[in-house]
Image: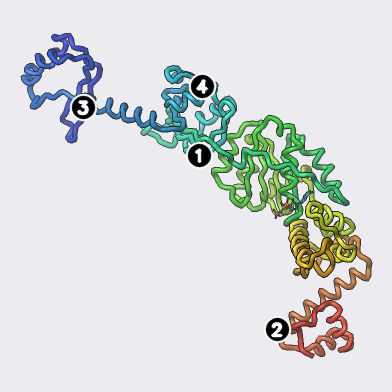
Amino acid sequence: MSIFSDYRINVRSGEIGGDSGDKVYLSAPDLLVAQYQSIEKSLHRVRGVRQVRRIELIPSERRHFELDTLLRHVTYPVLSVDRSGRIVAANQAAARAFGVSHSLVAGMSLQRFLPRLQLAELLRGITAPRYGFPVTVRGQEFAVDWSPIALAEAPGAVASLAGAVLTLQQRESLPSSEAPPPQVLWDLDRRRDSCLRLQQMAPLDEPLLICGERGAGKSTFLRAAYYLSPLADSGLLREYQGSDFSDSSLSEMLLLPCDTIVLLDDLDLVPESLQQALAEHLLQGKLRPRMVLSARSISALIVPFRQLLETQQIVLPPLRSMRPAVAGFAEKILGESGFTLDPAAAHALATRDWPSNFSGLQDCLQAAVAHSQGRGGRSVEVADLPASGVEETLPWTDWGRGLTLKEQMDKVERAILAEQLEVQGSAGHSTRDLARRLGISHTAVANKLRKYGLNEGGASS
Ligand SMILES: Nc1ncnc2c1ncn2[C@@H]1O[C@H](COP(=O)(O)OP(=O)(O)OP(=O)(O)O)[C@@H](O)[C@H]1O
């Protein structure tokens, strides 16, 4: 050092390195060639010095320089923040996204650019990386990857956090950020009550549960709840599917701001441990967004959710409990196709049980329209309807709504015969055995089987 000071050479930094740790690197950026030549000999005389060389960059400068070049070439924003949320370093792309000059970014507060990010929370307690949570910067949608910088002594401990590195990827058209297409709700028969309840409950803050069987319209109601919520105008929208719900979905949800509306479809398909965690966070008030959930039924959920949502649920009636309106629903579905529904076909539809509800009715009508088209028709007739699948046995009041006693009895009789045929078919019995078992004549059995279309490929006589 005295050699350098004798020659008035400013040494800005130094480090020890090399493969065997026996090299000393000194950074003297203003060193002139003549100065170097003069000190070189003196340096050689220092004990232990074997070689003196002049290099362009010392290793740490080189690393810095390489990182800088790398970041400059990264087209998406990358930046780092310290524990207090101040930006320490940022690349050009980040400065561009934030709309400030690159030289000014360092030192600014990140919150200024991402006002809705739960920054304090992230910096205070999150020690594992988080991927893909949505933010908006000057009207542009990004997904943020957040990697905490933990100090080596205690990685994983909150106290060890020194800040974080963030990367922002532009989101082209993430479905979750897009509002679903608005849909007019069918408000016939018992469905009208569900629509009215939705209108009353959607604008509230409490979590809302929509229950219904397969195809009963849960997803449709979830999306309608979004439009009926005051947040639809200004807030953020996030949609989750219960079957895909994971730990990272939950941690992402915890970071969402309070003006977000979360639609979580099929909560009953979320693993129980995650349902538990979700319920706890909700009860402790840690989940800020407005939650709208759906499930097959409230009894399919874990106990805390049942208690939490009991008074805040809308149960969608199954289609079979709205028999008087089945034709009306069918006409709404047919509406766009220009096909009409023949009264006999409408009646036939009303007698079916629709285990998959509106989805089943839609599929059936789609097939019927194709069939009718095939014969050059413009209306759906009984002959166009595909054969109905398996029918379910259900509580009588709902099940029989809109059916005469005779129609109800016929459905029961058919179900009994179909079940008996299946049992005896596998045991190799005949229709005579069936007649004996049911206590009726063989002719009566044959007539009934014919009436219900059960005689083909069934039991032998
Ligand atoms: N009230 C309604 N108004 C308009 N369309 C509806 C209504 N209810 C259901 N539908 C239509 O019926 C079909 C089934 O509805 P949806 O997908 O919402 O049911 P789901 O209960 O979520 O089904 P799944 O259990 O299979 O997820 C959809 O095509 C939907 O458009």
Q: Quadrant of residue 358?
A: bottom right
Q: Is residue 81 above or below residue 457?
A: above
Q: Residue 79, can we see it? A: yes
Amino acid type at mark 3? Ile
Amino acid type at mark 2? Ser
Q: Name the residue rendered at 31%, 30% in the picture.
A: 66
Amino acid type at mark 4? Gly
Q: Name the residue rendered at 94%, 68% in the picture.
A: 405
Give the x, y percent position of residue 392. 78, 67
The answer to which of marks 3 and 1 sits earlier in the sequence is 3
Q: Which mark is residue 99?
A: 4
Badge 1, how many Cα within 10 Å: few under 14, some, many 20+? some
Find disc 3 in the rendering and name its residue: 16
Q: Secondary structure at mark 4?
A: loop
- Quadrant occupied by the N terminus: top left
Q: Are marks 4 and 1 in contact (CB under 8 Å)?
A: no
Badge 2, how many Cα within 10 Å: few under 14, some, many 20+? few
Q: Which mark is residue 426?
A: 2
Q: Quadrant of residue 419?
A: bottom right
